[in-house]
């Protein structure tokens, strides 16, 4: 095989361009060259993936199947080139062909297959599983439009379709020969024949699931895994008789209904049709996946009796929970097993990662919807529920506990309880989160089956989120630690602590951060027309917009700063820029109001000459992976201010830390473990602890008392009622904080209780910022101690403690 030099790669690109588009490099557009680059790398990875698959099958290795309704992959061209060790060669080849490599990378759309941390975590883990040479496959839906592309119009979020597949489909390898059929509705007929009970679903609507595979290259290895994305198609041909009569819509109705399943991520479920579509998505995804996995297992072993010995199904949150009754259906209806044998295999095959302690986020489905859409699955769920309920009754003899732990109760199917009953392991994603699951959320289940409950603190792909996106810092780390060992052994970052008293290193860190800030400022000006001051503190909060993440607390503090500046224009000496990025779920009215508020405040400050070169607020439109990759290296302050006990882990906090930003945060999620390695001296903690939150809630918390006692807080809240220069008032948010609304307690997430402590932490941060030596020493310690949050460590823990598979 010829060495993959820049010249060889250039020849491959030119040849692929001619064969795929009939063009020479002089005729090609940036978009076509991006596709060609993707196709050339895809070909390389496909060959390696075939070899990986053959080796896995030949050696009969145990396989991991990672099911997630989201895989937030971001852009793949630079990442795959980096992992393949071809990034310098690709850059050079593109330049030789007359293109700007940076422009080619920039034209690639983010794959719209996720929303937030859940999907980004899945993507990081898939990279690490591949790098650690674990035979693994990711499974999800091939969403046509993803969640949405965010546009800010007059300060408000507007949702636009995200047509990522126009260019992004270059990475997808359709495999129609491996299509599966998924049934919805119909009626169940049972009959005995040859001594076996046969189950037939009559009158069902059949949707075809077509796999589109996306290869994932590991770093420093020939191992390649696959992300299998299921596209939905109707099995019925277009009715030509209707078409001929001019009834065009009716003729294609079946096709349109089927394709809706793979149209968007998370359709709104505040109406029956939305709930129905979301449940269809979940069953479509898990049924196609389990049919595929079991069919491949049968090809190799000829039996499903050893399925649990050679496969582990990891479900990322409750969205894939129907994998439990679906596997039971296959084992009983298709493999002819008895209940006990099938249940024994299922409960030794499935593991569940929980990502939330929020009661409203623990999925529950209306019983009548499950009965109507999934009649055979409903029968199996009834049996699982009945047996589990008897088990709980026998253990506790307590009706209240039986009701709480039930899978089917009160007309609902509870997916988290299904996962606990049908899984071999349940893990939280940070130390605090896992403890809350054991002691509160799933307390009774943990007492009954304590061996199931584990912790695996989340991790991030440090090769992407440090070395790839922050080349200046990567070069410094290599120089100080003696090479690139940290790319495969992230714990070696700890060597940086030895340079904590080296002024030259502080200076180098400062120069790298300054260059990154200037680069991001140029990007922000080009894409949003906003002018950022690189001399200002870049104080950043980017994450999904949800009330528990408390973007509103950040806003209240900024209002306080603004009012202070009005009183005394000399009060702010160090320029301070607050950067926000967030999408709100389309149906989440309060979250969308908070986005509007951020933009109202940004507009007010931007038009006030008193704030010039002192205070700025910017909302970054359409926050996504590729934007985060530019922002993280430039960030100096990381806002991780969720109410203690609400954030499961977080992964943005880890990315900021790894890039040298300092955290202002509560002791929540993985912040707790960050604090364990950093100490009080290297981050800025504030606010109530989880146990204090619980005690305050149990007592008589009256936010109006804080409002009446705290002059600064009183004035901030009044500003919401008064409104801003754009003429928008926020009386609704004022009322929500002080008096609550129907179905929501006053100040539900205790913003007002933590306000004073938060303002104090911000003041301390700005004071430390002026001491550049101290700041850069703290930054260095953050980078040095971030290795523990690498996804390689987390995946190794899963492999050793839950999956029981070997790894590199």
Image (cartoon, rainbow, N blue to C red):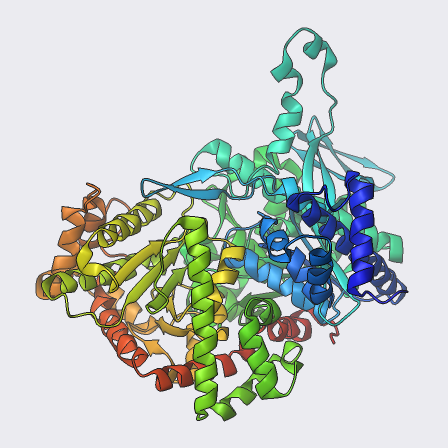
Q: Position of residue 699 (x, y in %)?
A: 21, 66
User: Eyeballing the image, is 46 above or below 223?
Assistant: above
Q: Position of residue 359 (x, y in %)?
A: 41, 55
Q: Position of residue 484 (x, y in %)?
A: 65, 80
Quadrant location, the N terminus: bottom right
Q: Is residue 323 left or right of residue 744?
A: right
Quadrant location, the C terminus: bottom right
Question: Which one is nearer the viewer's eye here, 79 or 654?
Answer: 79
Q: Position of residue 337 (x, y in %)?
A: 79, 51
Q: How many marks overall? A: 0
Residue positioned 77% across, 63% down in the render: 6
Task: Name the quadrant containing residue 240.
Answer: top right
User: Eyeballing the image, is 361 above or below 461?
Assistant: above
Residue positioned 80% across, 47% down in the render: 16
Residue positioned 46% across, 70% down in the render: 515
User: Eyeballing the image, is 121 above or below 142?
Assistant: below
Q: Is residue 335 left or right of residue 600?
A: right
Question: Which one is nearer the viewer's eye here, 290 or 366?
Answer: 290
Q: Is residue 605 left or right of residue 595?
A: left
Residue sitting at the far top: 245
| Residue 119 shows up from this direction | yes
| Residue 785 shows up from this direction | no
């Amino acid at each position: 095989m010829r060495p993959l030099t820049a010249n060889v790669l250039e020849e491959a690109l030119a040849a692929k361009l001619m064969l795929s588009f009939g063009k020479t490099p002089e005729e090609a557009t940036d978009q076509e060259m991006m596709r060609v680059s993707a196709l050339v790398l895809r070909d390389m990875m496909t060959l390696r993936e075939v070899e990986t698959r053959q080796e896995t099958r030949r050696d009969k290795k145990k396989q991991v199947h990672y099911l997630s309704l989201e895989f937030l992959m971001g852009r793949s061209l630079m990442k795959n080139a980096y992992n393949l060790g071809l990034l310098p060669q690709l850059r050079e080849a593109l330049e030789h062909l007359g293109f700007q490599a940076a422009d080619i990378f920039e034209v690639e759309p983010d794959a719209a297959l996720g929303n937030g941390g859940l999907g980004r975590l899945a993507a990081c883990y898939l990279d690490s599983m591949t790098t650690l040479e674990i035979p693994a496959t990711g499974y999800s839906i091939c969403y046509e439009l993803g969640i949405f592309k965010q546009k800010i119009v007059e300060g408000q979020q507007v949702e636009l379709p995200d047509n990522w597949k126009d260019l992004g489909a270059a990475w997808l390898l359709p495999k129609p020969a491996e299509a599966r059929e998924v049934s919805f509705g119909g009626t169940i007929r049972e009959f005995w024949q040859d001594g076996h009970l046969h189950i037939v679903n009559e009158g069902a609507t059949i949707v075809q699931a077509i796999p589109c595979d996306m290869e994932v290259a590991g770093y420093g290895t020939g191992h390649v895994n696959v992300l299998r994305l299921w596209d939905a198609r109707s099995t019925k041909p277009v009715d030509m008789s209707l078409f001929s009569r001019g009834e065009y819509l009716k003729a294609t109705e079946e096709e349109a209904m089927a394709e809706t399943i793979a149209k968007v991520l998370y359709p709104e479920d505040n109406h029956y049709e939305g709930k129905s579509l979301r449940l269809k998505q979940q069953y479509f995804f898990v049924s196609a996946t389990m049919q595929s996995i079991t069919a491949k297992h049968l090809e190799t072993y000829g039996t499903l009796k050893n399925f649990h010995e050679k496969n582990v199904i990891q479900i990322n949150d409750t969205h894939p929970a129907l994998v439990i009754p679906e596997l039971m259906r296959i084992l009983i209806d298709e493999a002819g097993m008895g209940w006990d044998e099938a249940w024994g295999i299922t409960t030794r095959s499935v593991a569940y990662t929980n990502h939330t302690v929020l009661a409203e986020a623990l999925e529950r489905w209306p019983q009548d919807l499950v009965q109507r859409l999934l009649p055979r699955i409903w029968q199996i769920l009834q049996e699982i529920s009945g047996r589990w309920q008897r088990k709980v009754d026998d253990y506790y003899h307590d009706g209240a506990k039986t009701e709480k732990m039930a899978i089917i109760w009160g007309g609902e199917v509870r997916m988290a309880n299904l996962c606990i009953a049908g899984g071999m392991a349940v893990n939280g994603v940070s130390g605090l989160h896992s403890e809350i699951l054991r002691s509160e959320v799933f307390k009774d289940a943990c007492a009954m089956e304590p061996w199931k409950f584990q912790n695996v603190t989340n991790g991030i792909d440090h090769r992407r989120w440090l070395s790839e996106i922050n080349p200046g810092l990567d070069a410094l780390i290599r120089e100080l630690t003696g090479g690139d060992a940290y790319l495969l052994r992230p714990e070696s970052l700890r060597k940086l602590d030895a340079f904590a008293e080296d002024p030259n290193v502080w200076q180098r860190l400062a120069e790298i951060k300054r260059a990154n800030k200037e680069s991001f400022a140029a990007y922000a000006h080009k894409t949003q027309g906003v002018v950022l001051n690189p001399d200002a503190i870049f104080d950043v909060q980017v994450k999904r917009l949800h009330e528990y993440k408390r973007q509103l607390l950040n806003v209240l503090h900024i209002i306080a700063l603004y009012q202070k500046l009005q009183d005394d224009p000399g009060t702010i000496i160090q320029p301070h820029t607050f950067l926000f990025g967030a999408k709100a779920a389309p149906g989440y009215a309060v979250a969308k109001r908070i986005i509007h508020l951020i933009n109202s405040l940004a507009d007010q400050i931007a038009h006030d000459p008193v704030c010039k070169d002192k205070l700025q607020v910017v909302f970054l439109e359409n926050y996504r992976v590729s934007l985060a990759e530019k922002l993280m290296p430039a960030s100096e302050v990381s806002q991780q201010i969720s109410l203690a006990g609400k954030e499961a882990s977080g992964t943005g906090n880890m990315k900021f830390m790894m890039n040298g930003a300092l955290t202002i945060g509560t002791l929540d999620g993985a912040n707790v473990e960050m604090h364990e390695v950093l100490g009080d001296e290297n981050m800025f903690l504030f606010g109530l602890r989880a146990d204090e939150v619980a005690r305050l809630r149990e007592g008589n918390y009256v936010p109006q008392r804080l409002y009446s006692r705290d002059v600064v807080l009183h004035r901030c809240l009044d500003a919401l009622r008064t409104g801003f220069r754009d003429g928008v008032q926020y009386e609704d948010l004022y009322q929500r904080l002080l008096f609550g609304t129907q179905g929501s307690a006053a100040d539900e997430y205790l913003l007002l209780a933590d306000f004073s402590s938060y303002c104090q932490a911000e003041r301390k941060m700005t004071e430390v910022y002026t001491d550049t030596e101290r700041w850069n020493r703290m930054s260095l310690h953050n980078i040095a101690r971030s290795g523990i949050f690498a996804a390689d460590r987390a995946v190794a823990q899963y492999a050793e403690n839950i999956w029981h598979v070997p790894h590199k």
